[in-house]
Image (cartoon, rainbow, N blue to C red):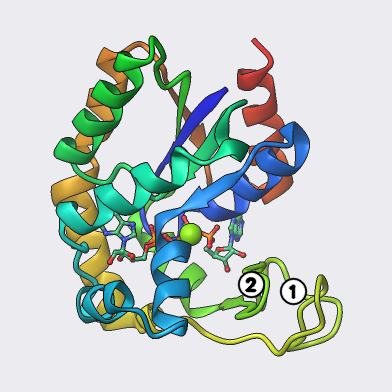
Amino acid sequence: MKIVMLGAPGAGKGTQAAMICDAYKIPHISTGDLFRSNIKNGTELGKKAKAYMDKGELVPDELTIQLLMDRVSKDDCKNGYVLDGFPRTIPQADVLTDALAKIGEKVDFAINVDVPDENIVNRMSGRRTCPKCGASYHVQFMPPKKEGICDVCGAELVQRDDDKPETVKERLRVYHEKTQPLIDYYDRCGVLHTVDGTRSADDVFQEIRGILSK
Ligand code: AP5
Ligand code: MG
């Protein structure tokens, strides 16, 4: 099962991807998380990516595509995966489609988590993430059991550098220009499913589960 998560920044792609991966035991591949771990480890790729991410811009396709293709070629991806934050441009989608076609495969589901822009800034300002295990919370909508502490691994939660309101606005602008066209792209491939992402994370997941079980 190969699943692509679509949706604006903060729509809940990462939250839903984590729930799907937990239920179906397939790896969760987030290009954003891969870049953040490169930044944390001080790699050359991390240094290059940070300059774009801090401004809310996309990291250039040539850096992103290589990173993703290396990751999906690993052994744990044999039974499928959930891509969260990739593809984000038409050229990225074309590379994925072509690479899968070469091995007689395709994206099985593109899940578009739909949330209007008005709700996004509020979601982002309340997001807290775990720098150690990557778990994601929201101070109001999905608080951890103990304030500021990760339920999973006990590390202190942090706010993402790119969650400042000005950067969020730029990320939304870039989303509408470069990534939203992928909704039509996957619709034309016959694999698009749009879910209303404004409901609770559990309700959204129930709907996704229904789609995936068809
Ligand atoms: P990335 O890390 O992918 O960020 P993003 O797409 O902007 O998305 P987010 O992670 O911010 O949001 P999300 O949809 O995962 O929402 P979440 O579940 O956390 O990318 C970061 C940067 O890396 C990009 O800007 C770019 O520079 C670069 N990059 C990455 N991939 C790239 C690519 N392919 N090409 C080029 N550049 C790339 O939820 C958000 C908050 O809301 C959380 O606090 C959560 O708890 C809460 N929440 C979730 N669901 C609900 C709900 N149903 N109700 C209430 N609250 C909810
Ligand atoms: Mg995410």
For the point 58% across and 47% down, the residue is: 28
Q: Residue at x 56, y 35 (%)?
A: 77
Q: Which quadrant would the N terminus be assigned to in this image?
A: top right
| Left or right relative to 25: residue 184 | left
Q: Quick check: can you spot residue 13?
A: no
Q: Secondary structure at mark 2?
A: strand
Disc 1 + disc 2, Cβ < 8 Å: yes
What type is the residue that disc 2 sits on? His
Q: Position of residue 167 (x, y in %)?
A: 27, 78
The residue sitting at 26% across, 61% down in the picture is 172
Queried on whether the Cβ of the residue with tag 2 lies below 8 angstroms from ligand 1, the answer reads yes
Residue 114 located left or right of residue 152: left
Query: For the residues marked 1 and 2, what is the alpha-carbon distance in whole angstroms?
Result: 5 Å
Amino acid type indicated by mark 1? Pro
Which numbered disc flags the more N-terminal residue, 1 or 2?
A: 2
Above or below residue 209? Residue 102 is: above
